[in-house]
Image (spheres, helix red, strand yellow):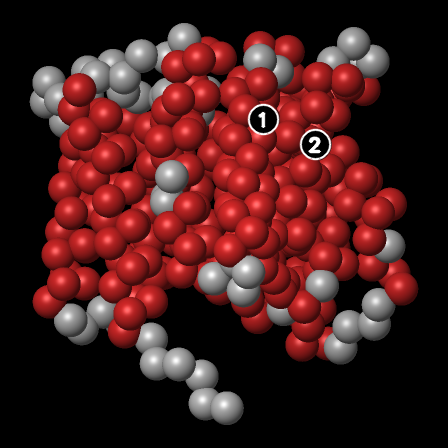
């Protein structure tokens, strides 16, 4: 890989993460108008329309096994978004992202056997303990918001597993189908929460912006970047999501975090970084 192409890919992935967390911040502005479930429905539905129009998945044929995997991929994606938006209704964005990030971290560390792997697990658990609403360390942190964020993390783990089975790396049409199924899953909750307000022309431009920032643009950037960037480096970059969430929440939403919460986010980030590097080193090269 040429250094120039890798550097360009790093910039694209970083921009994608910035767009994702910026979109989440703007999504909170929709909560007073349509609720968290309504905002989730608008984001997924509009993102699905954009992705379907661009990638036209009906041109591809899937067998029964792929359809089952795509269906589960879309279901967990829809649940993940519903849980996450419900969580950040009552807890800061940075805390919500960090708690949600325990899902992919758990997948990465599943089946760990080496002592160093257990250190990353302990570090992640320590960071999680700093974020939980126990005693004086997380004053004002809503317990239900924490539960919702952890549920979103569990769904993110399922999203990774079913996404791999569906063959997300094989083509963008899979993601277009998955987002469409996720939108269908979220739709009843959005209608129950917001009703006809979902069709309010005044909020549709904001909702479209959220859909583009949180889904369509980051995915397009990743599609360009992933063929030119090592998977280990991609994992390291993704570990910065909680920090970007905290920064976005601070700059856009004026969300201030306690020292304990910042320490907890940092612990989860370092656990993810360490696990990514360790797993990459311990993975044997492919056989030619």
Residue ranking furthest to the bottom: 288
Q: Where, by quadrant of the figure, is residue 13 drawn?
A: top right
**Observer able to see residue 79:** no
- The residue at 83%/59% (across/down) is 57
Q: Is residue 136 above or below residue 271?
A: above
The residue under label 2 is: 212
- The residue at 14%/63% (across/down) is 116
Residue 240, x across and y down, in percent: 38, 39
Q: Secondary structure at mark 1?
A: helix
- In this view, the residue in front, 153 or 229, is 229
Q: Where, by quadrant of the figure, is residue 96 drawn?
A: top left
| Res 23 label | 1
Residue 129, x across and y down, in percent: 16, 37
- The residue at 58%/26% (across/down) is 23
For marks 2 and 1, the one nearer the N-term is 1
Q: Is residue 12 above or below residue 256?
A: below
Circles 2 and 1, Cβ within 8 Å, touching? The answer is yes
**Observer able to see residue 8:** yes
Is 60 left, or right, of 144 in this rendering?
right
The quarter of the picture where the N terminus appears is bottom right
Is 79 left, or right, of 104 in this rendering?
right
Residue 55, x across and y down, in percent: 82, 53
> Local crowd at mark 1 within 10 Å, few (<14), some, or many (≥20)?
many
- In this view, the residue in front, 238 or 180, is 238
- The residue at 77%/19% (across/down) is 204
| Figure disc tally | 2
């Amino acid at each position: 890989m040429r250094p120039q192409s890798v550097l360009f890919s790093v910039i694209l992935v970083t921009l994608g993460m910035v767009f994702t967390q910026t979109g989440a911040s703007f999504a909170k502005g929709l909560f007073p108008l349509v609720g968290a479930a309504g905002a989730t429905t608008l984001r997924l539905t509009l993102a699905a329309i954009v992705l379907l129009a661009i990638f036209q998945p009906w041109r591809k044929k899937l067998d029964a096994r792929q359809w089952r995997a795509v269906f589960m991929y879309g279901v967990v994606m829809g649940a993940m978004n519903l849980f996450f938006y419900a969580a950040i209704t009552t807890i800061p964005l940075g805390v919500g992202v960090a708690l949600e990030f325990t899902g992919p971290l758990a997948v990465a560390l599943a089946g760990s056997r080496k002592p160093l792997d257990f250190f990353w697990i302990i570090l992640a658990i320590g960071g999680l303990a700093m974020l939980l609403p126990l005693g004086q360390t997380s004053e004002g942190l809503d317990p239900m918001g924490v539960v919702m964020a952890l549920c979103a993390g569990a769904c993110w783990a399922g999203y990774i597993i079913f996404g791999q089975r569906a063959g997300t790396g094989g083509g963008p049409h899979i993601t277009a189908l998955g987002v469409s199924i996720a939108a269908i899953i979220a739709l009843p909750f959005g209608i129950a929460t917001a009703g006809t307000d979902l069709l309010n022309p005044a909020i549709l431009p904001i909702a479209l912006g959220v859909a583009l920032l949180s889904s369509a643009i980051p995915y397009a950037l990743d599609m360009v970047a992933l063929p030119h960037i090592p998977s280990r480096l991609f994992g390291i970059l993704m570990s910065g999501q909680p920090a970007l969430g905290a920064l976005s929440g601070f700059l856009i939403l004026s969300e201030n975090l306690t020292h304990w919460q910042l320490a907890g986010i940092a612990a989860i980030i370092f656990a993810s970084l360490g696990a990514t590097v360790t797993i990459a080193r311990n993975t044997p090269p492919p056989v030619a």
